[in-house]
Image (spheres, rainbow, N blue to C red):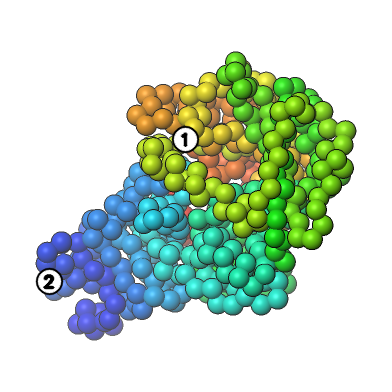
Amino acid sequence: MSQSNAISRRGVLKGAAATTAATIVGWSVANSAFVTAAQAQSGGGISPVPALDGVLETYSATAANFSKDFGELVTGAPRAVLRPGSVQDISRIITWARRNRLTLAMNGQSGTDGDLESHSSYGQALVPGGIAVDQRKLDRIHYISGNRAWVDSGVTIRQLTEAALAQGLTTVGVTDYLHLSIGGVISVGGIGGQVQKVGLFCDTVEAIEIVTGTGEILQASKTTRPELFAAAVAGAGQFGIITKAMIKLAPAPTNALVMNLFYDDLAAFTADQEKIMVENRVSHQEGEIVRKADDSGWRYKVEAVVYWTTTVPDQSRILADLRDTRTDIQIAEMSYTDWLFRLDPIEAFLKENGFWTPPKPWLSLVLPSSTVQRFIPSVVADLQPSDLGVGFSGLYPFFRSKLTHPFFMLPENPRDEKLWLFDLLRFPFPDDPNLQRMLDQNRRLYDLAKPLGAKRYTVGAIPGMTPTEWKAHFGGQYSKLLDLKRRYDPDRVLTPGQRFFA
């Protein structure tokens, strides 16, 4: 390819100078830097930018928008941002990045009201010095047919939910917060109050289109390239960039009965949570560690929700034999749509009062049921109200057998069929001086949980993770992880922010 042809190709990269906007035409291997057309005239080791349907940008303001995430704890600006005009653009840029030893990561840029950001919490989707791919450019719902939808990975769960509801359908297995890109969520898992029924949100995926770390555009499902499908979904972006997904839907109910039950005794709380789950009493089930009404300490809450359309739920049957403090029960009825979108006013409150943008040291762990009674007392002994700010601590069970993807790591003993999610989803007060204490607490609790068989959910913020610890995290799956990485991303181009290998 001649240099003049490379310079004239459409859709090449837009340059960084705010007023002159010099066009970048290639990458200097010798200098590890992008070069302009004028610089390219000197020749020597220039790798031309491929022709694109979209654009590749190096504006400093653009890079800054992709230099941090929701956690606000880790920063690192990319050298460039790809605004893809097609899936082929992602393939071309991955191939080009691989040839020039650049790294690349998809960035969901989720959120509302123009507040768009990666919703990783510890730099997992960042790519310092590499190329960030703006997932929001992949935003088409291709079709909804029967009980499934074929969508671009940049479509948010909220957008798909609204489109599905218009046809009398609903997404299932969803996260509580819906303004997240589908590609981002299914790349890490996605947990919510229907995990007991259908698994993670990623377990409702029936097929994907993916661009691997070698630039191949492939289709994968349980019957087509099943090994790639199993690994890439909840594979933390290590084997490819998911560009489309087929999502399972279900008929939408019209109403939700919401019951909040309170417990002062941990043993009664955990036993009732598992009873509700095993006996299939509700449609949605979560739980929390919450402050007592007089702020004298911690207690526990079960959030039990029954969806319905024509048959009013029998509250006496649902609540039979439970050992909650019945005088404190809270019961409300609302439309199913209002229930799905219940966090929107909470998000508005957080933004209006300055809680949305400060650093947020989140922690998420998966525990064997048999260890909850040992682990949680240590948590509540260590946890101060200020450690959460206006956030919350989740605590609820699910079945191992409902989760189907191998790299969402679970406690390794297969006899532990009942597992528990434990969360510290912190929203600290603005300018809180104790962020390091919170990070240290995350590390301390993780170190306490590991000998109990716990695994971490990769979206959290745990400082100081070493390659040896990541190897232990993946346990018996580690050799498979390496084999698939060598096969689908042999030059380790993709999603370096997870730091599994560094």
Q: Residue at x 56, y 34 (%)?
A: 392
Residue 462 seen in render = no
- Percent x, y of residue 169: 67, 68
- Percent x, y of residue 145: 66, 77
With respect to residue 307, does 57 lie above or below?
below
Which of discs 2 and 1 lies nearer the camera? The answer is: 1
Amino acid at pointer 1 = Phe
Quadrant containing the N terminus is bottom left
Q: Give the number of the disc on residue 30.
A: none
Residue 369 seen in render = yes
Q: Give the number of the disc on residue 427.
A: 1
- Percent x, y of residue 411: 71, 39
Q: Label 2, secondary structure: give it.
A: helix
Instruction: Write down the quadrant of residue 272 in the picture.
Output: top right
Q: Label 1, secondary structure: give it.
A: loop
- Residue placed most toward the observer, 78 or 2: 78
Q: Which residue is mark 2?
A: 38
Q: Residues within 10 Å of mark 1 (few under 14, many from 20)?
A: many
With respect to residue 440, does 416 lie above or below?
below
> Does residue 430 appear left or right of residue 288 in this picture?
left
- Residue placed most toward the observer, 239 or 435: 435
Instruction: Write down the quadrant of residue 278 in the picture.
Output: top right
Q: Residue at x 44, y 64 (%)?
A: 135
With respect to residue 432, does 3 lie above or below?
below
Question: Earlier along the polypeptide chain: callout 2 or callout 1?
Answer: 2
> Does residue 502 appear left or right of residue 322 in this picture?
left
Amino acid at pointer 2 = Ala
- Residue placed most toward the observer, 68 or 155: 155
